[in-house]
Image (cartoon, rainbow, N blue to C red):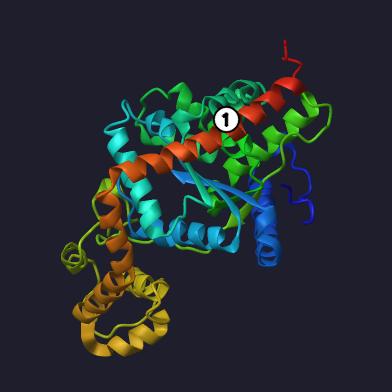
Amino acid sequence: MTSAALPSDPPIDDAELSTTETLDRSLLSAVARSGEIEQALATDASRFRVLTGDRPTGRLHLGHYLGTLANRVRLQDLGVQTMLLVADYQVITDRDDAGPIAERTRELVTDYLAAGIDPARTTIFAHSAVPALNQLMLPFLSLVTDSELRRNPTVKAENEATGGRPMSGLLLTYPVHQAADILFCKANLVPVGKDQLPHLELTRVIARRFNERYAGGRTVFPSPDALLSDAVNVLGVDGQKMSKSRRNTIDLAMTEDETTKQLKRAVTDSDRNITYDPVGRPEVANLLSIAAQLGAGTPEELAAQIGDGGGGGLKKLVTEAVNEHLRPIRARRRELEADPGYLASVLAEGNARANEIADATLAEVREAMGMTYV
């Protein structure tokens, strides 16, 4: 389970991980590597293991589907070994309680399966159900410094968003928890956006430091590669980033009537002549892009088709594209909702598989650290 056949990245100086120069170099390297990985996937996808997942904070929406979920199904269907994490512990990194976590976890598993995730080929599991995964946090925390954690872009952004509220220890160590998620199953490929590269870079640093400090240079943990996504941020009906907290989403679980009603609220502009101009007309371009990503045609073709139909014509076309594409997903979702026992069994079986992997990894870690006593 390695990516040894791919060219190696040049080593990155740990002390410089936060500099613009290093981040730019990391991005350029990741872009080049992603192209190589896509070629390798077409040749032998089975040599890759992917770790990806979501926090169970509500139903998945069209932004999730276009941004990550459809790609996960693609990788699974190519033959990639896929680990899909329900990150329930991470819900409390930036909030006081987990909310109706069991209900939201069921919703998340339902959305996964309805969209095409196959539990026979993809392991769906929950953070809290895999103790050995979380135990890796302890040795991993010994491999990073306080300053490295504090200058992580996501940690900094989340801390600034609290408005002066003290940062929790879990939020500060969030990048290390992500490293444990990735490395417990020895994933060698992680689909990420460009803004998530610093997290993955720290995971690579932790893997290298563990191998050097505790395993005498032996490779216990691989250095995972980033598979960069080409997906752009999907705007919600208010013209802002599609987000559950903004209530501006098109949920996978919505009915066709609810979708129609929501898209009627979508922001456009006063120009009746529809054109594809992402810079000058971002809201119009976003709607055209949604329909295009769902297979209705290119954004330019769709704009020409609508012509002088204005915002009303644009919304009608997008509504039809969304409802048509999501129709089989929604039908499958209704079937799954009617069988909660099956949903529970999928998660239970995935948890069991993840525990087998995590227990074996933790045993290897203890052996490398000289902590075997029997």
Residue 247, horizontal then vertical, whole percent: 23, 51
Residue 338, horizontal then vertical, whole percent: 24, 50
State left or right for residue 189 relative to residue 268: right
State left or right for residue 193 relative to residue 271: right
Q: For the point 40% across and 52% down, which residue is it? A: 112
**Callout 1: few (<14), some (14-19), or many (20+) C-alpha neighbours within 10 Å?**
many
Front residue of this view, candidates 161 and 329: 329
Q: For the point 33% across and 71% down, which residue is it? A: 325
**Element marked by disc 1:** helix
Residue 298, horizontal then vertical, whole percent: 43, 81
State left or right for residue 314 relative to residue 173: left
Q: For the point 29% across and 43% down, which residue is it? A: 340
Residue 65, horizontal then vertical, whole percent: 40, 59
Give the farthest residue toward the top: 373
Q: Tell me which corner region of the image, top left, top right, bottom left or bottom right, holds residue 359.
A: top right
Amino acid type of the residue that numbered disc 1 sits on in the rendered structure: Leu
Q: Which residue is mark 1?
A: 149
Q: How many marks?
A: 1
Front residue of this view, candidates 42 and 150: 42
Can I make out residue 56 in this image? Answer: no
Residue 144 lies, with reference to residue 160, above or below; the image says: above
Residue 154 lies, with reference to residue 339, above or below; the image says: above
Q: For the point 68% across and 33% down, which residue is it? A: 206
Quarter of the picture containing the C terminus is: top right
